[in-house]
Image (cartoon, rainbow, N blue to C red):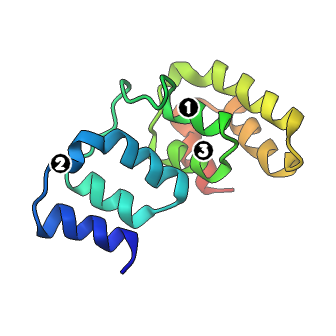
Amino acid sequence: MGFDKIVKYIIEDLKDETWKDEQVNLVYWACQTQRKKTLDVLVRNGATWTKDWKIEGTSFLQKAVIDGNLEGVKTIMVKEYFEANERMYVRILVEAHIEITTAKDIWEPILKIIKDKDPSFWKNAIREL
């Protein structure tokens, strides 16, 4: 049984509400691990991102960049789990990450989107990559 099926069983079949105590961590984890089915189950059952959601005191998008998780960054940008005013700081974080990574070529398109496009257009720009 896959993790998404376990989450679905606990939340939807057993009607267990205790997951809501950890919904911030669960949603972030689902974004970082590309567990789209798990993320869908969480969202369908009431997990609604807010600007107050933080991981280790950091926004979802900033934390994903700090961790160097490109797929997580993409998911967070597509799901719009960020605030528009994070743009400048996220750009600085991505530039710093590009300086130390060996995968510059896959991070540069993300940096270009952050630099050149208004945050309201990030979702579509990521999908077009």
Q: Quadrant of residue 36?
A: bottom left
Q: Which residue is mark 1?
A: 119
Report whether 31 appears left or right of 21: right
Label ID, residue 73: 3
Report whether 66 appears left or right of 22: right
Query: In the structure shown, which secondary structural element does the residue marked by tag 1 occupy?
Result: helix
Disc 2 crowd, CA 10 A, few/some/many (<14, 14-19, 20+)? few
Label 2, label 3: how far apart the Cα atoms are: 27 Å
Sequence-first disc among 1 and 3: 3
Task: Look at 26% across and 45% down and name the residue there.
Answer: 47
Task: Look at 78% across and 45% down and name the residue there.
Answer: 107
- On the rendered image, what quadrant is the N terminus found in? bottom left
Q: Amino acid at mark 3?
A: Val
- On the rendered image, what quadrant is the C terminus found in? bottom right
* Extreme residue in the bottom direction: 1
Q: Which residue is mark 2?
A: 18
Label 1, label 2: how far apart the Cα atoms are: 34 Å
Q: Quadrant of residue 5?
A: bottom left
Disc 3 crowd, CA 10 A, few/some/many (<14, 14-19, 20+)? many
Q: At which x and y percent is residue 50?
A: 33, 31
Q: How many marks?
A: 3
Q: Amino acid at mark 1?
A: Pro
Of residue 106 and residue 53, the one placed in the foreground of this image is: 53
Nearer the camera: disc 2 or disc 3: 2
Label ID, residue 43: none
Sequence-first disc among 1 and 2: 2
Seen in the picture, residue 18 relative to 50 is either above or below; the reply is below
Report if the CB atoms under discs 2 and 3 are less than 8 Å apart: no
Query: In the structure shown, which secondary structural element does the residue marked by tag 3 occupy?
Result: helix
Label 1, label 3: how far apart the Cα atoms are: 13 Å
